[in-house]
Image (cartoon, grey):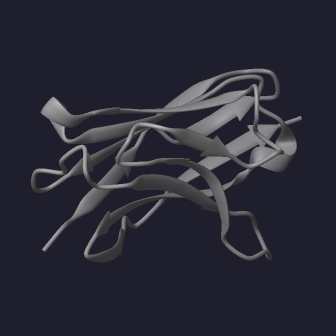
Amino acid sequence: QVQLVESGGGLVQAGGSLRLSCAASRSISSRNAMAWYRQPPGKQRELVAGISSAGSTNYADSVKGRFTVSRDNAKNTVYLQMNSLKAEDTAVYYCAALVNRWYWGQGTQVTVSS
């Protein structure tokens, strides 16, 4: 069983930064793909960024150049550094891990005021 706990969300003004963390309850090796998703109010969940087992990363077009996903396997943690935040980044952000199947965290709220 894998449990993921997100933290670091909150209220920030447009143009500001936040760093989200996702701590896993068991060892997530570098072989496990990880990802961040978000669900804006009234909209479907969407992929924000992913990091593969090979360490390659991919981003939604809307966050390229502003967000950076990274991982620390020794700490069983994945991060999402979010810079130059916009009001449209307001959403619940979810961490996900692929360990035979996708596991999800409960989410952390990010609110960007304009």
Quadrant into which the C terminus falls: top right
Residue, far right: 114
- Closer to the camera in the image, 113 or 3: 3
Q: Residue at x 13, y 56 (%)?
A: 25
When the figure is inspected, residue 78 is found, relative to residue 31, above or below; the finding is above
Q: Position of residue 88 (x, y in %)?
A: 85, 48
- Closer to the camera in the image, 10 or 3: 3
Q: Residue at x 37, y 64 (%)?
A: 105
User: In the image, 99: left or right of 33?
Assistant: left
Residue, far front: 54
Q: Position of residue 112 (x, y in %)?
A: 75, 39
Count of numbered labels shown in the rendering: 0
When the figure is inspected, residue 1 is found, relative to residue 12, above or below; the finding is below
Q: Quadrant of residue 59?
A: top right
When the figure is inspected, residue 6 is found, relative to residue 92, above or below; the finding is above
User: In the image, 28: left or right of 38?
Assistant: left
Quadrant into which the N terminus falls: bottom left
Q: Residue at x 80, y 76 (%)?
A: 42
Q: Residue at x 40, y 53 (%)?
A: 34
Q: Position of residue 37 (x, y in %)?
A: 58, 59
Q: Position of residue 36 (x, y in %)?
A: 52, 53
Q: Quadrant of residue 57?
A: top right
